[in-house]
Amino acid sequence: MEQSKVKYNFEYDNKVKVCFIGAGGHSFRNIYPTFQYAPVDLAAICDVNAERAAAYARQFGAKAHYTDYREMLQKEKPDAVFIVTSYHPDGRVQATDIALEALRAGVHVWMEKPTASSVHEVQQLIQASRESGRFAMSGLKKVFFPAIAKAKEIISSPEFGTPSSIYVRYPQSMPEFSERSDLRKLTSLLDHVYHPGAIINYLMGKIGTMSYEREPFNGGSVTNMRFLNGAIGTLHLTAGISGSSPLERLEVVGNGANVVVENGVKLTYYRNANRPAYGRSASYLVDDEVAPLHWEPEYSLGQLYNKNIFYLGYVPEVLHFCESILAGQPPQKGTLEESLEIAKLFEAYRTTPEGTKAVINEG
């Protein structure tokens, strides 16, 4: 992984003309600010609340604002649209329908996760993208975390060996099985399963089968997975943990090596090393050439990497989308195909009782 210097928006010669649908708190904090570091020409903002659309246009430098996204797309004719919206009353994802319209209108789409509430809807987006020749990318920010990207680099190296197992911890509950036919009761699970699901797919590939057990006290669960490549994994949804606790943990095991990411930013690579001789070793210290490698950020300097929009992957994903458009090449991360695999996992939770094996992909 190479360190690269970030360009500021005003330093780009070529930019993507962009419209933005949605003016909510999440987009204000985490998406609009990324445009300072991306080749974006923000032409217009749309929100059903006209005052908010106007306020966001003033704040982020858009030249126009609208309350009707169809009118905006027709008048502005952007290269791409960013969509950060909410849910329909029935629990479906609003952005799914908007993205379909935008693709069919010949506009590239970046949409915040969740991409859709069903496998069928993701497949519709894939088809629309293919037919229109326009790219669609979801905000799978976890695969753009610097720590997760570095973990991918490590587990792909020959010295790590074949990744054989993975453990992912994420704080999320799910309702009991009898309630899961009502999509309105699953918006929290749908909204958040995309995070661990993205990491699992990015690092280990497609899931073949899964089964899970759920506890009744907090709605937490443990899922066991078998991947198509033969590896195994565990997804621990830790509902009930303290609000002061670090939320996430990742560990991937190879052949004599393992890599751990704590709290999304602290990465340790335990390189292939022999254990000290049992009953004979006077020191726990191993040789320098096989000693663990550890990375974590320092927070004393006003560096860009200390901004959450960098270490949480927001700037890298927006850059990847814009650079893909300018290069005329489909995005390689955050793809609809990745979202499809996460949607399959979500549907398995929705339709499979506890303790029952679900087939996610045929081997």
Image (cartoon, grey):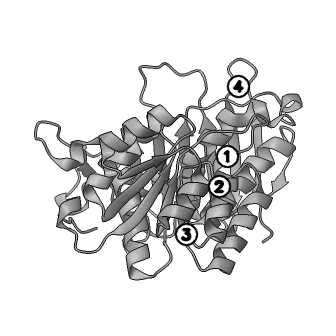
Assess disc 4: are there few (<14), some (14-19) or many (≥20) residues with their C-alpha within 10 Å of its C-alpha: some
Is residue 267 at all visible to an observer of this figure?
no
Residue placed most toward the observer, 75 or 318: 75
Q: Residue 248 at what x, y percent from top left? A: 47, 37
Kindly report the distance in space between the C-alpha atoms of the residues bearing marks 4 and 2: 32 Å
Kindly report the distance in space between the C-alpha atoms of the residues bearing marks 2 and 3: 11 Å
Q: Determine the residue positioned at 38% across, 35% down.
A: 55
Q: Determine the residue positioned at 76% across, 35% down.
A: 213
Assess disc 1: are there few (<14), some (14-19) or many (≥20) residues with their C-alpha within 10 Å of its C-alpha: some
Q: Residue 94 at what x, y percent from top left? A: 67, 46
Instruction: Say whether disc 2 or disc 3 marks the residue closer to the N-terminus.
Output: 2
Element marked by disc 4: loop
Q: Determine the residue positioned at 17% across, 58% down.
A: 288
Residue placed most toward the observer, 147 or 135: 135
Amino acid type indicated by mark 2: Ile
Which mark identifies residue 107? Answer: 3
For residue 25, side relative to residue 342 (left or right): left
Up the image or down, 24 lies above or below 93; here it is above
Circle 4 is placed at which residue position?
Answer: 219
Amino acid type indicated by mark 3: Val
Kindly report the distance in space between the C-alpha atoms of the residues bearing marks 4 and 3: 40 Å
Foreground disc of the pair 4, 2: 2
Circle 1 is placed at which residue position?
Answer: 94
Badge 2 vs badge 1, beta-carbon distance below 8 Å: yes
Amino acid type indicated by mark 1: Gln
